[in-house]
Image (cartoon, helix red, strand yellow):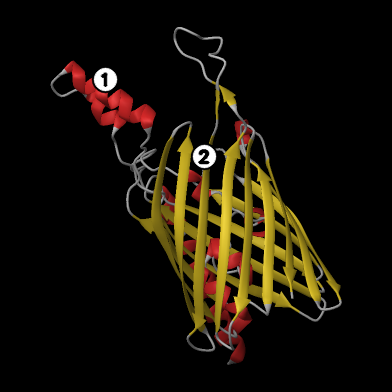
Amino acid sequence: MKSSLKIRVWMIVLVGLWSVSPLFASDFKNVGHSGANFLQIPVEPAGAALGNSYVAMAQGVDGLYWNPAAVSFTKGTEVLLSTADWILDTRLAHVGISRKLGSRTAIGLQATSFSMGEMEITTPFQPNGTGENFDAGNYVIGATYAMQLTDHFAFGASIKYVYEYIWEANSAVVAFDFGSYYQTAFYNLRIGMCISNFGGSMEMAGDPIENRLAEELAVEEQNNPRLQRLSSEYTLPQYFNVGIAFDPYRSEDYRITISSTANDPNDNQSRVSFGSEFALKEKVMLRAGFKQGYEEQRFSMGIGMVLNIGSVHARFDYGFSEFGILDNIHYLSMRFGF
């Protein structure tokens, strides 16, 4: 009887894993219509190594990016420091801290920057440079509150301030993340859901844009398309993630976890990712992932190592993500628990 029940439940789990796969077959929609796309870049290696299939696996400070509900599983105080060399000489840096407030609640703070080096200003009349330089970048800071409503279910929400700039123009907006997390005792099955970057529109403003608008208005041209381009608004890269994770094998020495996440963004086709993690005595973790529906991105892998020094729980993570013709991405992080 027990064997028959296990077979039926395993079938439900496997169907759940693969039921998300038709999502990536949907048509492209609003491609390139969003801004501040650095918000879609994973900020830590564990989730990146698992192909971004981490919405149902993150726990503690990792949840600040992947699923705010997971922050409720913080133990004591946790700190995450991570960095990644992104494409075309850009760099991503992230710091997060979460703190347990009681038996069921936790809070967190995060800050992420996406930046590049200075570039020389050129014009059609001065193609070799004007002697001036400019830079561009993005920042986000946020706060999270999470609560375990029951022994199995948790909910969390984040408020974020998103800012981006280029030369003397900038734009800012407030956005929100909402997440839920459900955990069972059956093979440690977890279900996670998260809506990210829910907020208003952004519009670049600054002296260069204002001056150009004044020039175009002086032309007095009807239906001037340049006016629309100079003053156009754009949305944040909003997306809905839903995923599951479970441990098909767990013993005192070994653990195997399988995960899958479906991602439905507002500016691209829906897509799905899969990941697997092998843990040795919860001290060494080997990870691998696969993405379907992502352009240029397919395989990923990584490793995690845990070291306990007195009351400090330290974990080093490395993640590698294939990015096709845009070269490969390397992620590094240190996570501390007190």
* Residue 216 seen in the current view: yes
Q: Residue furthest right?
A: 309
Q: x, y (%) of residue 141?
A: 52, 57
Residue extending furthest bottom? Answer: 1
Q: Is residue 208 left or right of residue 244?
A: left
Residue situated in front as seen by the camera: 327 or 234: 234
* Residue sitting at x 77%, y 68%: 279
Q: At label 1, which amino acid type do we have?
A: Glu
**Residue 226, numbered label:** none
Q: Secondary structure at mark 2?
A: loop
Question: Does label 2 or label 1 sit earlier along the sequence?
Answer: 1
Q: Tell me if residue 165 comes above or below residue 211 in the rendering.
A: below
Q: CA distance from mark 2 to mark 1?
A: 39 Å
Q: In the rendered view of the protein, which quadrant contains the N terminus? A: bottom right
Q: Quadrant of the C terminus?
A: bottom right
Residue 215: give its label.
Answer: 1
For label 1, the SS is helix
Residue drawn at (36%, 37%), measured in percent from left and top?
Answer: 205
- Residue wearing tag 2: 295
User: Can you tell which of label 2 and label 1 is closer to the viewer?
Assistant: 1
- Residue closest to the eye, 290 or 58: 58
**Residue kind at label 2, given as amino acid type:** Glu
Q: Quadrant of residue 310?
A: bottom right
